[in-house]
Image: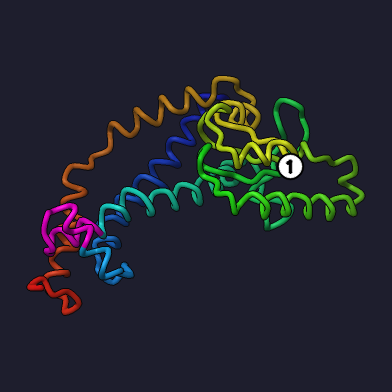
């Protein structure tokens, strides 16, 4: 597939499966009180931070804003990107369920077994050893497969979707000493074979985002949630 065709396919996928889904979930799911597990102490504090008062509007914002602007879209992004690579035939599902995707590296022409990560700071210290153990275990299993002779550590990578080498956290750097961490432009180049693919994709995605109608999205969502909060017996705004 030509570079521009592939970029358009990815942009279409983002529009349908990430942006549109997020907008619909914001209105139809996250505006419903039943979708939240509420910490009564923190929600009261956050309401005070947002509205300088403990009231239904403050509680609605304290619940709705973090879900819609943080948890919801971040979770969807990671899940959908992995699906996208497979559905658009840029990669295949991994040899082992413990990893995310496999693809032929367009630079060295070797098959890469890849764990995907969103960004250069999205790894905690507690994630380092499990991830490296996962790679090591997969290599041991792979070496028992005659068809996979010659496999090495450099065939097992962490693919970081955006950022730069200089942005990588120390946790990624620990992994990179044994297994390559491929970041941003370099990752997309290896995946697609087009050196400037990442930059062109970002431009197209920004153009797509500018066309999305999000007028009153946030207000409509939290106002719907506020109506339920007002009618709920869970909250006592008199105290």
Q: Quadrant of the N terminus?
A: top right
Rendered position, 123 above or below 104: below
Looking at the image, what colour scheme do you see? Answer: rainbow
Q: Quadrant of residue 161?
A: top right
The residue nearer to you, when weighing 188 against 7, is 188
Residue positioned 43% across, 38% down in the render: 12
Q: Quadrant of residue 105?
A: top right
Crowd rating for badge 1 (residues with CA inside 10 Å; few <14, some 14–19, many 20+): many
| Residue 216 location (% of width, % of height) | 16, 46
Q: Is residue 175 left or right of residue 31?
A: right
Q: Secondary structure at mark 1?
A: strand
| Residue 89 location (% of width, % of height) | 62, 41
Rendered position, 205 above or below 220: above
Q: Quadrant of residue 43?
A: bottom left
Residue hosting label 1: 156
Q: Is residue 156 magenta?
A: no
Q: Which range is magenta?
A: 45-62
Q: Is residue 230 left or right of residue 102?
A: left
Rendered position, 123 above or below 58: above
Residue positioned 26% across, 60% down in the render: 63
Q: Is residue 137 left or right of residue 20?
A: right
Q: Quadrant of the C terminus?
A: bottom left
| Most common SS among magenta residues | helix
| Residue 18 location (% of width, % of height) | 40, 46
Residue found at the very far top of the displayed protein: 196
Q: Is residue 54 magenta?
A: yes
The residue nearer to you, when weighing 39 against 68, is 39
Residue found at the very far left of the displayed protein: 238
| Residue 116 location (% of width, % of height) | 59, 44
The residue nearer to you, when weighing 234 against 125, is 125
Rendered position, 74 above or below 44: above
Residue positioned 75% across, 39% down in the render: 178
């Amino acid at each position: 597939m030509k570079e521009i065709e592939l970029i358009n396919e990815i942009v279409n996928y983002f529009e349908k499966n990430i942006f549109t889904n997020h907008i619909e979930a914001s209105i139809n799911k996250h505006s419903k009180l039943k979708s939240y597990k509420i910490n009564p102490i923190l929600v009261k504090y956050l309401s005070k931070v947002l509205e300088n008062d403990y009231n239904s509007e403050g509680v609605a914002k304290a619940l709705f804003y973090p879900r819609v602007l943080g948890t919801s879209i971040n979770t969807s992004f990671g899940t959908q990107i992995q699906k996208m690579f497979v559905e658009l035939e840029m990669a295949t599902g991994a040899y082992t369920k413990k990893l995310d995707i496999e693809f032929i590296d367009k630079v060295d022409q070797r098959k890469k077994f890849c764990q995907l990560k969103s960004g250069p700071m999205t790894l905690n210290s507690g994630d380092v050893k499990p991830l490296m153990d996962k790679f090591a275990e997969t290599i041991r299993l792979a070496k028992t497969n005659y068809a996979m002779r010659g496999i090495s550590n450099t065939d097992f990578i962490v693919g970081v979707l955006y950022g730069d080498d200089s942005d990588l956290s120390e946790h990624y750097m620990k992994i990179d000493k044994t297994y390559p961490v491929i970041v941003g432009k370099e990752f997309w180049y290896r995946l697609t074979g087009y050196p400037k693919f990442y930059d062109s994709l970002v431009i197209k995605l920004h153009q797509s985002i500018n066309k999305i109608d999000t007028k009153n999205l946030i207000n409509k969502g939290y106002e719907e949630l506020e109506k339920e909060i007002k009618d709920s017996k869970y909250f006592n705004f008199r105290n």
